[in-house]
Image (cartoon, coloured by chain):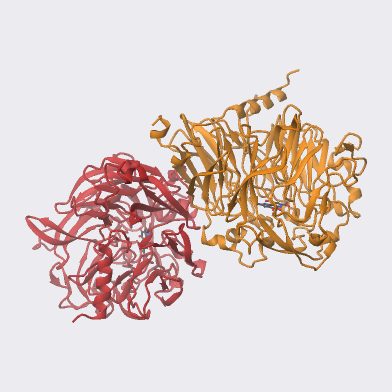
Chain colours: A orange, B red
Amino acid sequence: LVTTTALANDKLVEMQENASDWVMQTGNYANWRWSELDQINKDNVGELQVAWTMSTGVLRGHEGGPLVIGDMMYFTTPFPNNVFAVDLSDEHIIKWKYEPQQDPNVIGVMCCDTVNRGVTFAPGEGDRPDIILLQQADTTVVALNAETGEVVWEAVNGDPAKGETATMAPIVVKDKVMVGISGGEYGVQGHLTAYDLNTGEQAWRAYSTGPDDQILFDPENTTHLGEPVGADSSIKTWEGDQWQLGGGTTWGWFSYDPELDLIYYGSGNPGTWNPSQRPGDNRWSMTIFARNPDDGMAKWVYQMTPHDEWDYDGVNEMILADLEIDGQTRKTLVHPDRNGFSYTLDRETGELLVAEKFDPAVNWATEVVMDPSSDQHGRPQVVEEFSTAANGEDVNTTGICPAALGTKDQQPSAFSPKTKLFYIPTNHVCMDYEPFRVSYTAGQPYVGATLSMYPAPDSHGGMGNFIAWDAAVGEIKWSLPERFSVWSGALATAGDVVFYGTLEGYLKAVDAETGDELYRFKTPSGIIGNVTTYEHGDKQYVAVFSGVGGWAGIGLAAGLTDPTAGLGAVGGYASLKNYTDLGGQLTVFALPDRVTSGQ
Amino acid sequence: LVTTTALANDKLVEMQENASDWVMQTGNYANWRWSELDQINKDNVGELQVAWTMSTGVLRGHEGGPLVIGDMMYFTTPFPNNVFAVDLSDEHIIKWKYEPQQDPNVIGVMCCDTVNRGVTFAPGEGDRPDIILLQQADTTVVALNAETGEVVWEAVNGDPAKGETATMAPIVVKDKVMVGISGGEYGVQGHLTAYDLNTGEQAWRAYSTGPDDQILFDPENTTHLGEPVGADSSIKTWEGDQWQLGGGTTWGWFSYDPELDLIYYGSGNPGTWNPSQRPGDNRWSMTIFARNPDDGMAKWVYQMTPHDEWDYDGVNEMILADLEIDGQTRKTLVHPDRNGFSYTLDRETGELLVAEKFDPAVNWATEVVMDPSSDQHGRPQVVEEFSTAANGEDVNTTGICPAALGTKDQQPSAFSPKTKLFYIPTNHVCMDYEPFRVSYTAGQPYVGATLSMYPAPDSHGGMGNFIAWDAAVGEIKWSLPERFSVWSGALATAGDVVFYGTLEGYLKAVDAETGDELYRFKTPSGIIGNVTTYEHGDKQYVAVFSGVGGWAGIGLAAGLTDPTAGLGAVGGYASLKNYTDLGGQLTVFALPDRVTSGQ
Ligand SMILES: O=C(O)c1cc(C(=O)O)c2c(n1)C(=O)C(=O)c1cc(C(=O)O)[nH]c1-2
Ligand SMILES: O=C(O)c1cc(C(=O)O)c2c(n1)C(=O)C(=O)c1cc(C(=O)O)[nH]c1-2
């Protein structure tokens, strides 16, 4: 039976096959951030030039990147989340600009800068035009007519007065758009919510914590490491009603496997960073979810960091790739987690295949237990010295690696089906962490810890590495030291080049096999956007946002100077101000005609 | 007698001879905006590439440009007027950044965006270090140690509570720094003020209007068109005390002739734009001044627009060049005025040599009378139809060309000693002007006219031209039509190239002889900065600010949409929003190594 629903789905699947376009933030449903384009390749990338540039008219952290569909480019800015439609075939004219009217008070309850990870495209169908979807900082989900910029519908996903905000890029699956929510530092009960693409009506909502009918779990059929979760799997891991402030927000990247018909995403930290205040595993914070996109029901889950004591949100991207493991091709999901372990799971069943540290500095746990027969199966083995729960409230636990912003945070990795390697932008940062008792007031920070951050000791002195990761075995193939965390997303291409940006503002291109640097260019501001590529008029372009900010750049972005301000990030990145300043620009690169015309 | 004073002067004169540096905003004391560098020339400029970029961290109108002295680059931003020192030899690191603390209320009394036309360099001498001078928006003049960014001294030049603000770049002559003041739309009595470079103490102040001891006129020796001005030359051209609100502000470009030891600058419009409220010639508004830099005494003056009825401020740059006129080499001063006439004067005597329209659209006057024996000598012959005074209060005079922002506004011209041509960025805009009665309240707008602006009718439809002007005869050599006013400053080079920027954001390079376009690049935002060039490590660079704004871009910069808002500029430039958005970036261009190494 071919339903119209299935058709819409097919259209988006088909569109991502077209390498000329960049039809979704993640490159494809599998989150590869990969392009088949190879006009720019490892032999000529050194000749890259800036082709055109554009200011977004907004400062602070520019995450995400532009979408390209045919002649049109679409992107959004940090708060106030202006959306631009730019005509690539006509002098880059701004065909329309959508300027949401948002209460600026929302800025005060955004934990980690005024970022937005981008707009999402939904192909038209029947009466429905092509649509550009945005979740604004204030959680309003808005569907814009891609042709005119007119509002087709709006939906309210949360309430900033309770600390509910939004930064993530929606995902469109079939006739629905799914969005997450931010506010883990405000006691928000995280959820994933699906809206009807035609009307904006809510189709379903799946909380990360709470009773089974709120988390959309089937006690018999939803599994954790192969076992049914049983009834009340979330609420029995919390004291009393604490799950209501349980965090587990959903502000990261989502993926979808059309064949298995499952969506994947992770949940963030449990509510309050003071672990002593919330005994238990705090399920399902810090968890990977596989859900049915039609009704939201969970097929399987896996909790990476039970009873988090370090703010190691589990929201990082899930990259869907078929890898050969122990001689067998497996449908895997690869997830480099904030806690410093990169997990390779069977994405159909949730079976844990690999869990290895992707930064040797990681010290809070020795390993993740892989033996299915152990009662510790899948659990990290915490090192007592670095347990902020064991050390207790008002004790400063020092030297924890990674810091709260993890070995990797929102900055998404890329995957090359040619090299079978995962290119991961990482942090190389450690921390001191002192939990303290905090009480909940709606709309007020519910954090309960004082942090300070610094480069990983006894290493290269820098705060980041850009690495190539072999997820089939869990090994670093190569690692490029960086002065600061690599807070930008990577792009891998069929030209055997991998691109990423740095906090100082360099766009860098490296050899996909060896990591050798092939090109660098200093863009106007620190890069925390994600590199994208597209083709227009027979020319391949590489595009990236500049605009320093995000959690790593919050000192610059928000003008903070106290080292423990910005949830502890300000001190570690203080010297960033010598390298760059606030910005908000798109820089687009291409090869000179001389090169593309075959020299 | 070689005094230390004379030495300081010599040092700056000497430094401007060094084409590697860009030691003053105007290129040299003569305001040529010319460079002897010719690595980039008309044959290879088409291969220009973006070499590096930098965001200033501030949005809105970026006028002026960077200075380069050796390995260091210095620049300032629009309000809050942050000053950057950037190390060209070390990854463009921000060596220091000065962040003035200014009351943001000053923004509300800046007439034409939050612009600043740049910092000024003063070479060290004795105990005094090299200094970077800035006049902040709030009129504080600050001297910064060029090495460290520390404040050496500060002086207060005006009071924003009375509408006194600042936007201009100071000029250093011998042991003094001279600054002007803005506020012609607030009834400010304009003045030029000199401060001691060592101490910041006021040396002298010369008002534009008022009694002789305030305007520093010698009734016997100060001349107007060759005649002594006589006593009370200013106050007798005003009714009662009106000269106290007389305007004549001094926010443009200054020049200096070391040989004649004279500084040159112009004064702005008389107070209130409603001419009926201030009968008389309103001297010395709208006037070119030649003054002695040591004591401020005026040698000669020339009033271009007596009794202004159109806001044709006379502040545009004075370019000092020796030109052959009627077979004789004359020491001239060339001044393309806002009123649409370009004036060539003898800069020693103030004799009027040429006064011709530099846009054929100019219609408010038929000519400037050149006959010295006429009682109309030097006066424009006003066309009654376009006289807002003749038509009177509350009457809308329509179709006046140019508009209030003139055939040229602050955007400075360049001069090539090779072609002997002046490259003038112009406006091609006309207006309707309706004066109304207004009363004075300190710190409140004292404008008294409603304006609307539009492209010059029956022409190419655009709002600007970039022209080459032969100032010896007063003729347009060539004229390039532009969609919008060319609000950026030009640069001419020994490579036979002329550069300018457009409001859409293009940097353009044209052939100095023919005007043929040789190169264009779309920078991140509209360009109202002035193009500069320098050499570093054997490479020639061309640098320009992007950041749309200024009066022409005030709609975008301040978010205004009512067509008559922004003193009438919003409507005419409304479509600019389709081409660019707010920004604040430096883009630096160079030739690829392949080209500079001789292919
Ligand atoms: O708990 C949350 O709801 C939440 C939200 C966000 C966000 O929405 O950006 C971040 C985080 N947490 C967070 O822990 C974090 O490290 C982080 C980094 C960034 C960023 O954009 O740089 N956002 C967030
Ligand atoms: O009368 C004044 O004091 C005054 C000041 C300024 C300024 O300081 O920028 C401008 C003007 N007038 C003015 O008339 C004008 O056209 C203008 C344009 C600009 C600009 O930077 O785009 N400033 C000013």
Q: Please name whichever residue, A364 or B207, is drawn nearer the observer in this view of the structure.
A: A364
Q: Is residue A265 above or below residue B223?
A: above
**Residue B126: quarter of image:** bottom left
Residue B281 visible, this orientation: no
The spot of residue B355 in percent (x, y) is 17, 56
Quadrant of the picture in which ligand 2 is shown? bottom left
The quadrant of the rendering that contains the N terminus of chain A is top right
> In the picture shown, does residue A20 fall above or below B302?
above
The image quarter containing residue A421 is top right
Answer yes or no: is residue B371 visible: yes
Kindly identify the residue that appears in the image at 77 percent across and 52 percent down.
Answer: A269
Q: Is residue B24 left or right of residue A468?
A: left
Q: Nearer the viewer, residue B450 or A121?
A: A121
Furthest residue toward top: A1
Q: Position of residue A90 (x, y in %)?
A: 44, 34
Number of marks drawn? 0
> Which quarter of the picture shows residue A216?
top right
Q: Residue furthest left?
A: B327
Q: Is residue A13 left or right of residue B196?
A: right
> What percent of the width, then of the height, locates residue B566?
43, 55
- Please state the horizontal and vertical placement of residue A77, each as a whole percent of the image: 57, 47
Which quadrant, please, contains the C terminus of chain A? top left
